[in-house]
């Protein structure tokens, strides 16, 4: 199972057909990999913060 996105309404689902509007969903492509990632530092910081929040719950 992969996460799918509806191109018309923009909602995410695991189904082949969007439960909100009835359109066919697509598998969104991941972002391109770059060694010179300008925002990687902030993504990793956010990931650590979210991990800490999940551990404290």
Image (cartoon, rainbow, N blue to C red):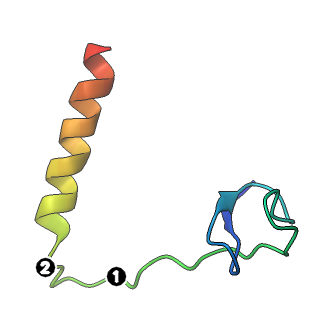
Q: Nearer the viewer, residue 37 or 42?
A: 42
x, y (%) of residue 25? 77, 72
Query: Residue 6's mark?
Result: none
| Element class at badge 1 | loop
In the rendered image, the vertical position of residue 28 relative to residue 50, given as above or below? below
x, y (%) of residue 29? 56, 80
Query: Residue 33's mark?
Result: 1
In the rendered image, the vertical position of residue 36 relative to residue 47, given as above or below? below
Q: Nearer the viewer, residue 5 or 41?
A: 5
Read off the residue under disc 2: 38
| Element class at badge 2 | loop
Of the 4 image quadrants, the one containing the C terminus is: top left
Residue visible at 34% across and 82% down in the picture: 33
Q: Residue 17 appears in which quarter of the rendering?
A: bottom right
Q: Residue 37 appears in which quarter of the rendering?
A: bottom left
Residue visible at 81% across and 67% down in the picture: 21
Residue visible at 13% across and 79% down in the picture: 38
Q: Nearer the viewer, residue 25 or 35?
A: 25
How busy is the neighbourhood of tag 1: few (under 14 within 10 Å), some, or many (20 plus)?
A: few
Disc 1 from disc 2: Cα separation:
11 Å
Residue visible at 25% across and 46% down in the picture: 47
Q: Nearer the viewer, residue 32 or 21?
A: 21
Of the 4 image quadrants, the one containing the N terminus is: bottom right
- Image check: 18 left or right of 42? right
Pick whichever of labels 1 and 2 is earlier in the sequence. 1
Q: Are marks 1 and 2 in contact (CB under 8 Å)?
A: no
Q: Residue 8 appears in which quarter of the rendering?
A: bottom right
- Image check: 25 left or right of 12? right
């Amino acid at each position: 199972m992969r996460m799918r996105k509806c191109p018309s309404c923009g909602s995410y689902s695991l189904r082949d057909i969007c439960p909100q509007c009835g359109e066919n969903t697509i598998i969104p492509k991941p972002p391109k990999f770059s060694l010179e990632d300008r925002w990687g530092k902030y993504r990793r910081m956010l990931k650590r913060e979210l991990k800490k929040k999940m551990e404290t719950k």
